[in-house]
Amino acid sequence: MNQSRGQEAALTQLAQQYTKKTGVKITIDTPGPVDYLPKLQAKAQSRSMPDIYSSFDASQMAPFYKAGWAMDLSSQLNAGWSKNFSPAVLKMSTFQQGNNLGVKPGVYSVHWETQTYGFLINPALTGISAEKPPATTAEFIDALTAKKAKFSIAASQTPNIIQALASNWLTDAEIEATLNGKASWKQDGWRNAFQFLADVKKAGVLADNSIPGGQDDHPNVESSFFTKKMGAIFDAAPGIAVGLRTNPEFEEYFSSGVPKAPGSVHEPRSPGIPGKGAVINPRGKQSDKALAFVKWLTEPEQQAVFAKTARILPTNPELLAGADIPDQLAGFAAGVKSMQVMSTTFTPDVITAIRAESQRLVLGEATVDEVLTNIQAAQDRTS
């Protein structure tokens, strides 16, 4: 079961190639990003899980891992498979002892994509060029204001932009401590990060003066950008593949990391997470064949197909260093070297709180301090 429509063509091509090579037939089901998790949950409840399924956000995958629907791949990786992946991606894929999601230590997914975050910017609407992007978040807002251009971010992406913005003031260790409940959400770094959302709203450049929510919030935000209605959005590297599918003729845009914030003490760093990849169902009758297919998918030759056909950043160290990166991916690719590499993530309660509180903030229903108080309460419930 494949979550990403952006990689569907490449995955189908590779599956057909594998069948021709081995005689093993691969059936691919792509319900799409909105329907993927509900369908996967229904499969788990009916005990009819696929042999292989797409990995997703760790907090949303954790229930499947804890229920025994994922093969621990640690021994396979330790036996030499790990050479196909960068150390950073392996670390981010590993659940450590005592992790805040309660998953048994191990590695339950492998990935052929490295994912970073930043802005997608349309120069025609914003007047911002890839050659001289805004040096600070304040300059970014000013540029949008000057052109009366709009910026949009989905509620589901607010935890990622907040984490990226907070890195202007917090180290990776300090961010990780907060996510693990060992440091306060009321630190200035988090306060300043949420202030950006308030500033965007105050400047009048936030699209519809709100943060869209709902199950398909991010696909709708991406669609607004790739149909040339939105000046800039917050997105991740996989958005480039979405753009290729949504409007392949539109290529006059670029990606950029989140700019440095005024008064920052560190260079801002994108959250890093493993991107597209696979989980293997150990209870399936075809688990050995599934493992062999996934191993083949993650070999450099196949990762190169994903990179070229779906425009995604590979995880293989040599490909990542020497890949022919499309211009649209350049900003996201630049963020790989300095991305935040952690073995922890937001808990589900904190994710829910950040999404809700971000919306309340831009609607004028809460101050930044009230937002932080409510997020801290959500953290305390799960720490």
Image: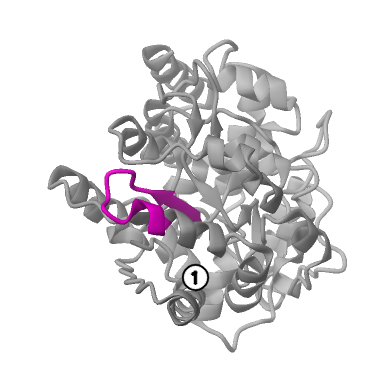
Q: Amino acid at mark 1?
A: Gln
Question: Is 281 contained in the magenta span?
Answer: yes
Which residue in the structure is indicated by mark 1?
7
* Residue 122 image position (x, y, % from top left): 66, 72
* Residue 362 image position (x, y, % from top left): 47, 41
Indicate the secondary structure of the residue bearing disc 1: loop
Direction bottom: furthest residue:
249
For the C terminus, give its image quadrant.
top left
Q: Within 10 angstroms of label 1, few (less than 14), some, or many (20 or more) residues?
A: many
* Residue 359 image position (x, y, % from top left): 42, 41
Left or right of 64, for residue 123: right
Q: Residue, x 51% and y 71% (percent of image)?
A: 242
Left or right of 178, for residue 265: right
Region rendered in magenta: 277-290
Residue 271: tell me if it is visible.
no
Direction right: furthest residue:
131
- Up the image or down, 248 lies above or below 224; here it is below
Q: Residue, x 41% and y 26% (percent of image)?
A: 103
Asked where in the image residue 306 lies, by quadrant, the reply is: bottom right
Colour pattern: one colour
- Up the image or down, 26 lies above or below 346; here it is below
